[in-house]
Image: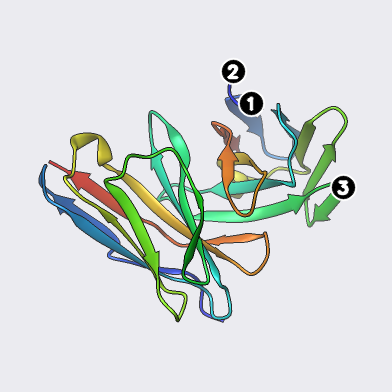
């Protein structure tokens, strides 16, 4: 089975712009979770989608949003980018509770 | 106080040594996860456990629910074990709360 894929792998954006990241889960997995990793804050949970519905949400501002499609692929969007949004964004898919992580998208905001 | 505390933060070992990384948590959980992250960012799930002990190759993970404590052991450590080891707990669904990680370096 193919693993979790994320696109793009690297991205450079300017403050104020918006960005959309994509995650394709392992075939058959209906849950997709998103995480942000920074040197200062470590790994933090953003949100989880299950069957196209947001099931859990972390403590991030409304600039961070996501959605899930009927094929379980998920996107996350960050609007009005700030320098502090520079991070590695990871998604993980799961069938039940064990999570399988993608390689991440490294976002740099200048 | 963080919900998930790991110790030590940094660990240097000689090849062949027995290694222990500890994780304590402060709330009730549905499961505890041990993750491994290599330079470059990729994260691999090593164990998910809610009770007892699990073993995979040279890795052993234990959890004591009453004491809210888990340990990850690496037997006969090898330089390829060098990585960041992260403890995480889940309470509802797949929402994970992470420890700060333990940076392990195994010298040959």
Structural crowding at the residue carrying mark 2, measured as other residues with C-alpha within 10 Å and reported as few (<14), some (14–19) or many (≥20): few
Q: Quadrant of residue B101?
A: top right
Whichever of callouts 1 and 3 sits on the residue coming sooner in the sequence is 1
Residue at the spot of label 2: B1
Identify which residue is drawn at 46% across, 70% down. Answer: A52
Q: Are marks 2 and 1 in contact (CB under 8 Å)?
A: yes
Q: CA distance from mark 2 to mark 1?
A: 8 Å
Q: Are marks 3 and 2 on the same chain?
A: yes
Residue at the spot of label 1: B5
Structural crowding at the residue carrying mark 3, measured as other residues with C-alpha within 10 Å and reported as few (<14), some (14–19) or many (≥20): some
Question: Residue B64: horizontal and vertical position, in percent?
Answer: 86, 35
Identify which residue is drawn at 46% across, 52% down. Answer: A47
Foreground residue, B19 or B79? B19
Tell me the number on the disc at residue B53: 3
What's the chain of the residue with tag 3? B
Q: CA distance from mark 1 to mark 3?
A: 20 Å
Q: Secondary structure at mark 1?
A: strand
Q: CA distance from mark 3 to mark 2?
A: 27 Å
């Amino acid at each position: 089975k193919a693993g979790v894929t994320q696109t793009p792998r690297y991205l450079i954006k300017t403050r104020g712009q918006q960005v959309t990241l994509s995650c394709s889960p392992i075939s058959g997995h209906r849950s997709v979770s998103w995480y942000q990793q920074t040197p200062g804050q470590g790994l933090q949970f953003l949100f989880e989608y299950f069957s196209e519905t947001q099931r859990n949400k972390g403590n991030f501002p409304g600039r961070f949003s996501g959605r899930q499609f009927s094929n379980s692929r998920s996107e996350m969007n960050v609007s009005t980018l700030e320098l502090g949004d520079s991070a590695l964004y990871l998604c993980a898919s799961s069938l039940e509770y064990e999570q399988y992580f993608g390689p991440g998208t490294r976002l740099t905001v200048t | 106080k963080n919900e998930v505390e790991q110790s030590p933060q940094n660990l240097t070992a000689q090849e062949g040594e027995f290694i222990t990384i500890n994780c304590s948590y402060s709330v009730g959980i549905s499961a505890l996860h041990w993750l491994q992250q290599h330079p470059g960012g990729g994260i691999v799930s090593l164990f998910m456990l809610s009770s007892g002990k699990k073993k995979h190759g040279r890795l052993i993970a234990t959890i004591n629910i009453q004491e809210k404590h888990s340990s990850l052991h690496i037997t006969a450590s090898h330089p390829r074990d060098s990585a960041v080891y992260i403890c995480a707990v889940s309470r509802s669904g797949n929402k994970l709360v992470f420890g700060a990680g333990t940076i392990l370096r195994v010298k040959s």
